[in-house]
Amino acid sequence: MTMQAASTEIASRTAAIIDEMKGLEGPLLPILHSIQEEFGHVPKDALPVIADGLNLSRAEVHGVVSFYHDFRAQPAGRHVLKLCQAEACQSMGSEAVAAKVKQLLGIDFHETARDGSVTLEPVYCLGLCACSPSAMLDGEVIGRLDDEKIEEIVAEVRS
Amino acid sequence: MIPRIYIPADSGALALGAEKVAKAIEKELRERGVEAKIVRNGSRGAYFLEPMVEVATDMGRIAYGPVKPSDVKSLFDSGFLTGGHHKRWLGSPDKIPFFAKQTRLTFARCGVIDPLSLDSYKSHGGLNGLQNAVAMAPADIVKQVTESGLRGRGGAGFPTGIKWKTVLDTAGSQKYIVCNADEGDSATFADRMIMEGDPFVLIEGMAIAGIATGATKGFVYIRSEYPHAVATMNKAVAIARRAGVLGPNVLGSPNAFDMEIRVGAGAYVCGEETSLLNSLEGKRGVVRAKPPLPAIQGLFGKPTVINNVISLASVPVIMDKGAAYYKDFGMGRSRGTIPIQIAGNVKHGGLFETAFGLTLGEIVDEIGGGTASGRPVKAVQVGGPLGAYFPRALFDTPFDYEEFAKRDGLIGHAGITVFDDSADMMKQARFAMEFCAIESCGKCTPCRIGSTRGMEVLDKVAAGIEAEKNLALVTDLCNTMKFGSLCALGGFTPYPVMSSITHFPEDFKPAPARVAAE
């Protein structure tokens, strides 16, 4: 696909999402979630279409997208691994867990492995504070991380 | 009678392997040709026993836990479907000390019923409160909630009834009920548990709030880190709508009330009520200056009740059993019950609902059973990332809004994180500043700049650069943040920082001196 065609494709799929949701009260966040679900990230080419559809300035839309940690400018890896780094998990050694995972995957937080297999992110609380340290792999929760579970996770994202 | 097996689908239980246990039980049932009904309940909150599987027997429910998939075969061999003995046998859940010592009002059904069965909800007292409310004048509902003494369980502790009265008394073409389910504080999971384990109680509480204040539309703003809670709430709202609990005629009355579930996008500051309102409107989640109060100009500029999940979920029992019944629990100006969430490095972690008034020591040592690591408790952070660290010397503090305030702390959303003696309090203080810097919305200077400067100055202390002078600077900075910030993020970050410095001064000595001292 040429760049031009890709951009047209993004615009038309974005417009369809906006059409479906713009009747909601305060539709921007639900629209952005849908776009991220559709494309795996919020493409730059979608922003002017949103601005147009909701009668906002491009700056306003950019301001909202960039404010929230969840919205990605680039696609993530095939897997997304989030490690909780908040206090309850800290008390149970989340820092050591993060160090081990980073070493095994060869990437730091906010990075994606070169082969595109996994994106690693810190998260500040998954609400699993009585089973720390915890993680979320592709939306599934994992508690009481230990060496064995870490190795299982690493094997899964690499497979 | 077909046996009933209860396997929690609560996130905490899932994180500990409940799904694999459920699969193993299904497989075993198939292979043995035994018929049974599996109910995916919420969690009762004892995470040290999860996955806790229960079976309904002639002797009532019998619990087993923590169950591993490898236990399943032997559970069947031991006749667990009729309550047979097994190494995981726990007996009647009501008699397990962790549950027997609780007073469950808000969480009465959580972990007991099928979360998505409205019949099950009703047969356990559900909808009684709403049924009473639809027959009452709005002002009388507000009066009953005010008299119950219920205060905002999100952390601020503002009287719920007074908030409602302001919205009732403010004219508006449209009014809203907004439920703050952006439970971002570490050590807290009460909102998540109730949304996953008893979603109808929140729906009922919001409908009552709507009728009491003249609001016809509600929003639940749930953080994106809670996908299971989002899914359960969406299903529950659809069921409630079909059953006429929500809609143009709530329970057949002339009152209209409907609601939507909205998902956050990973910004901690959106737990602050005015940020949350901006986020719901589709804006950057920046804090708004108050006044105007949200009760007068809230969502889309309209009068809005914004309450925490637990505040709203506590309303049905108040409307069912009366203000006096609820108010009889508690101490001082902290009335009713509070779901304390015991987390971190603790042996018996979980949710413990009780009347206000237990001491911190009783909670940590007796109920929590001390640390998971077996080492001595060094510090307990009460109230999430913006709460103070308490040393053992303050373990006599009763769990009460005012008593914690007297000791320069707060109970917040009632989460407590236990740390053992390996904790480095300078690191914890630095993390508090770092977290504030990551999550600051950027609107006010003390929070936006202060948090970053705070990290830098604490790094200097750690490196032994003019430690005394720099600690004085941190103290001064904390003072500015506390009194100069617009919201609790910048305003309360000084609590963990200053409590660490005050109660654990030995951790703030420069590195060479600390080594020499050891």
Image: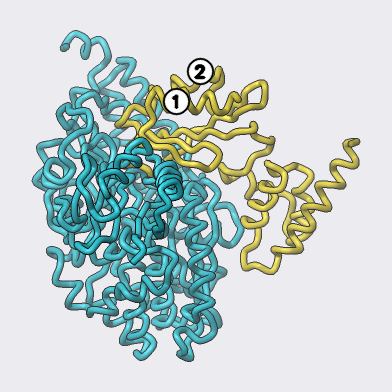
Chain colours: A yellow, B cyan
Which amino acid, mark 2? Leu
Query: Is residue B466 or residue B221 the one in the foreground?
Result: B221
Q: Secondary structure at mark 1?
A: helix
Residue shown at the point (25%, 45%) measured from the top left? B78
Q: Quadrant of the N terminus of chain B?
A: bottom left
Q: CA distance from mark 2 to mark 1?
A: 9 Å
Residue A9 rendering spot, x and y as whole percentages: 85, 47
Residue B336 rendering spot, x and y as whole percentages: 20, 66
Residue shown at the point (23%, 74%) measured from the top left? B148
- Which label's residue is closer to the chain start, 2 or 1? 2
Query: Is residue B24 or residue B251 the one in the foreground?
Result: B24
Residue A89 rendering spot, x and y as whole percentages: 35, 34
Q: Residues within 10 Å of mark 1 (few under 14, many from 20)?
A: some
Judge whether residue A25 can be spotted in this image: yes
Q: Which mark is residue A104?
A: 2
The chain to which mark 1 is attached is A
Q: Which mark is residue A150?
A: 1
